[in-house]
Amino acid sequence: MIYKLCILKGILTMIWGEVAFLLGKTTLSAILFISVTTYFCCLALCNNQYLSFARQAYMITFILAISIATSAIGKAGSVEYMLMFSMALPFLLFSYRREKSQVIVYSGASVLLRFLLYFTDFTHFVDIPLNISTLYL
């Protein structure tokens, strides 16, 4: 299943990276193209029988790419609803009996990033101006 997900997500992310580039969001498109590279590396890992590492790399990339894309696009883009899918995806990819900790960690990371997006009002995660004078007290 991870093999097919890597192919599907790699192609979809490549399309969204091109759309972001055409819209002038060069930072977002660069991040999405890095994600595409990671998805295809996970695909190669699946072929070389490193399935456990491929699943973990896929989940980390998937969750971070969605969170960064949502942060860059904003609430109007409705990309954050993909985080709901990423909350349930670990239950499909990992065995709940043998890999319960991974299910909890990846689902929890999706929930945590969803709350961070909500509390930052879907703006960039680091959007606070730094006042240099307060640093040297």
Image (cartoon, helix red, strand yellow):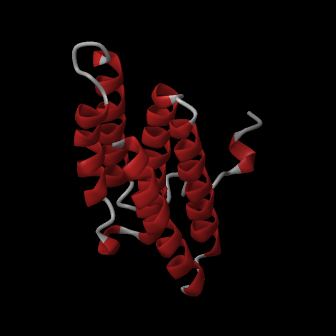
13 relative to 55, above or below: below
* Residue depicted at 46% across the width and 62% down the height: 69
Q: Quadrant of residue 101?
A: top left
x, y percent for residue 9: 42, 58
Q: Is residue 60 left or right of residue 102?
A: right
- Quadrant housing the N terminus: top left
Image mark count: 0
Q: Image quadrant for the C terminus?
A: top right
Q: Can residue 123 be spotted in the picture? A: no
Residue at horizontal 33%, vertical 65%? 79
Residue at 39 percent across and 54 percent down: it is 120
Which residue is rendered at x = 46% and y = 26% of the image?
52
Rendered location of residue 103, percent (x, y): 29, 26
Picture quadrant where residue 23 is located: bottom right
Residue farthest along the bottom direction in this orientation? 22
Image x and y of residue 83, in percent: 30, 51
Q: Tell me if residue 69 comes above or below residue 41 in the rendering.
A: below
Identify which residue, 27 or 3, lies in the foreground. 3
| Residue 115 in which image quadrant | top left
Inspect this view and state whether residue 78 appears: yes
* Furthest-top residue in this view: 98
Instruction: Using the image as rendered, state which of residue 95 and residue 63 is in the foreground.
Output: 95
